[in-house]
Image: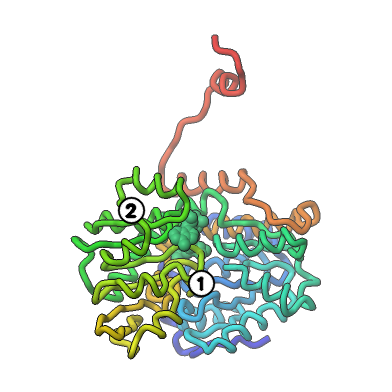
């Protein structure tokens, strides 16, 4: 099948971006060398749905180096980078993606990536699995299994598993230690602020930042806001996470109270309509709203439309909503995940671990799919350890190991 990209003349720029991240992804480079020798995907078709920027492009190349024919679609209409897509096509990967396609075109690209009838999939947010289940079960037959990248997709796949509808084994890569501990926390923490700062060109120090949701991503976003000099308020629905945020030094209160104080609001819950009418009604003039959760449902855009008298783009990726009382609220990246819609996503060194885990998990599911059955499993611990060991090696950091006596002690109930 022929690739669908915006403009092949952009390939040289895309190639520079991919080469840059490759230099900073030593773990994935090691896995690539191993795959070149062992060819775990020889003769197989792999369909990938991920944010189509440089780090993802390099993962696609590593899977190809493992012997696969690779087909890729974007997982968000704003995060696809046209130059990267063009470079990938030159590298022999079939791409179905454009930056800012219309919603029908976006969905069509996902369908095209599945119409090649893949043997394996890499999914993000459950886009492939839900599409296969609800609209195209005819394309399931060859699929041995796959890997899921993010929290929201794990929730959706587990719901499919619970109802007995998960059609093949999936590995919850998000739940691997080398994924969520670093990607969701340090990756989102840094890249959210990188994208907000480059998009707004405004100061954070001294301002009040409201972080909605204190999960893995929220912890990172709040930590980095504090580092930038902001006063940070956390809102939660989970009492344990709320205490954690409080003991981490943040103010905790209901969002309807925090709404009056915030200069920046960052929703990162994986839930829908967390910022809605009652909050928008009391926000300060000039408040900036962003979402870092997977789908563009965390800020209720219907409420923003209903409460405003006008909407216009005032700067790239900033929409100004003028409220009936004259207040102006600013929404970044159309309420889509801000760090990819208005930035380049997580740093390369973080995605090195995430995508190394993706690569080894994909090889694992290909090897063990018959044993696993139609279930969603967590990343086997030995794969997490493999990636962690390679990362430490790349960082030049040594650690201690247990003595034989200590091993015995740790497995015993006796105290001498
Ligand atoms: N932007 C990125 O690059 C990126 C990276 C990783 C994950 N994600 C996405 O971010 C979202 C969050 O992921 P996570 O790993 O932090 O999940 P998580 O489950 O660790 O945390 C979510 C938190 O939100 C809280 N929450 C839910 N509804 C809420 C509400 N109405 N008000 C306040 N708090 C609420 C939950 O109690 C929980 O503590 C998911 O959609 C995930 O797919 C985005």
Q: Which residue is painted at 27% across and 75% down in the image? A: 200
Q: Which residue is painted at 75% across and 76% down in the image? A: 117
Does residue 213 appear to the left or right of 153 in the view shown?
A: left
Q: Which residue is painted at 78% across and 56% down in the image? A: 373
Q: Looking at the rendering, in which quadrant would you find the N terminus?
A: bottom right
Does residue 258 appear to the left or right of 34 in the view shown?
A: left
The residue nearer to you, when weighing 262 against 206, is: 262
Q: Which residue is painted at 33% across and 87% down in the image? A: 313
Asked whether residue 273 appears in the rendered view, the answer is yes
The image shows residue 83 at horizontal and vertical percentages of 45, 82
Q: Is mark 1 within 8 Å of ligand 1?
A: yes
Mark 1 sits on what residue? 295
The residue nearer to you, when weighing 338 against 73, is: 338
The residue nearer to you, when weighing 139 against 91, is: 139
The image shows residue 304 at horizontal and vertical percentages of 39, 81
Reading the chain from its start, which is encountered first: label 1 or label 2? 2
Asked whether residue 26 appears in the rendered view, the answer is no
Specify the farthest residue to the left. Answer: 206
Q: Are discs 1 and 2 less than 8 Å apart at CB?
A: no
The image shows residue 394 at horizontal and vertical percentages of 44, 49
Q: How many residues crowd around disc 2 within 10 Å: few (fewer than 14), some, or many (20 or more)? A: many
The image shows residue 191 at horizontal and vertical percentages of 37, 64
- Whether 282 is drawn above or below 401: the answer is below
- Whether 293 is drawn above or below 240: the answer is below
Q: Which label belongs to residue 223?
A: 2
């Amino acid at each position: 099948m022929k690739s669908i990209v915006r403009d092949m003349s952009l390939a040289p720029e895309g190639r520079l971006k991919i080469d840059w991240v490759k230099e900073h992804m030593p773990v994935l480079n090691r896995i690539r060398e191993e795959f070149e020798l062992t060819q775990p995907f020889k003769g197989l078709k792999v369909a990938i749905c991920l944010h189509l920027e440089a780090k993802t492009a390099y993962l696609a190349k590593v899977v190809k180096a493992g012997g696969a024919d690779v087909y890729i679609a974007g997982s968000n209409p704003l995060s696809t980078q046209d130059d990267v897509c063009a470079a990938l096509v030159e590298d022999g990967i079939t791409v179905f993606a454009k930056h800012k396609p219309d919603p029908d075109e976006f969905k069509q690209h996902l369908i095209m990536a599945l119409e090649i009838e893949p043997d394996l999939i890499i999914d993000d947010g459950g886009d492939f699995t839900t599409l296969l289940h609800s609209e195209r079960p005819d394309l399931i037959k060859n699929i041995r299994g796959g890997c899921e990248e993010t929290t929201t997709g794990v929730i959706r796949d587990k719901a499919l598993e619970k109802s007995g509808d998960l059609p093949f084994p999936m590995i919850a890569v998000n739940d691997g230690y080398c994924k969520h501990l670093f990607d969701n926390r340090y990756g989102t923490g840094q890249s959210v602020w990188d994208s907000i700062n480059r998009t707004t060109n405004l100061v954070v120090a001294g301002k009040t930042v409201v972080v909605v949701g204190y999960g893995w991503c929220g912890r990172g976003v709040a930590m980095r806001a504090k580092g930038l000099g902001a006063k940070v308020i956390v809102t939660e629905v989970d009492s344990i996470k709320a205490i954690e945020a409080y003991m981490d030094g943040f103010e905790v209160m209901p969002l309807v109270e925090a709404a009056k104080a915030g200069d920046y609001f960052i929703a990162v819950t994986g839930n829908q309509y967390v910022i809605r009418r009652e909050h928008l009604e009391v926000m300060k003039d000039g408040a900036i709203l962003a979402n870092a959760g997977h789908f563009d449902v965390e800020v209720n855009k219907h409420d923003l439309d209903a409460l405003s008298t006008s909407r216009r783009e005032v700067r790239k990726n900033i929409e100004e909503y003028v409220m009936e009382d004259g207040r102006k609220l600013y929404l970044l990246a159309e309420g889509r995940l801000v760090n990819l819609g208005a930035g380049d996503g997580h740093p390369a060194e973080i995605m090195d671990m995430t995508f190394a885990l993706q690569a080894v998990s994909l090889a694992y599911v290909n090897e063990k799919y018959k044993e696993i059955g139609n279930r969603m499993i967590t990343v086997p611990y030995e794969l997490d350890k493999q990636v962690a060991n390679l990362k430490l090696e790349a960082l030049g950091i040594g650690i201690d190991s247990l003595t034989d006596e200590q091993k015995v002690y740790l497995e015993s109930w006796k105290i001498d």
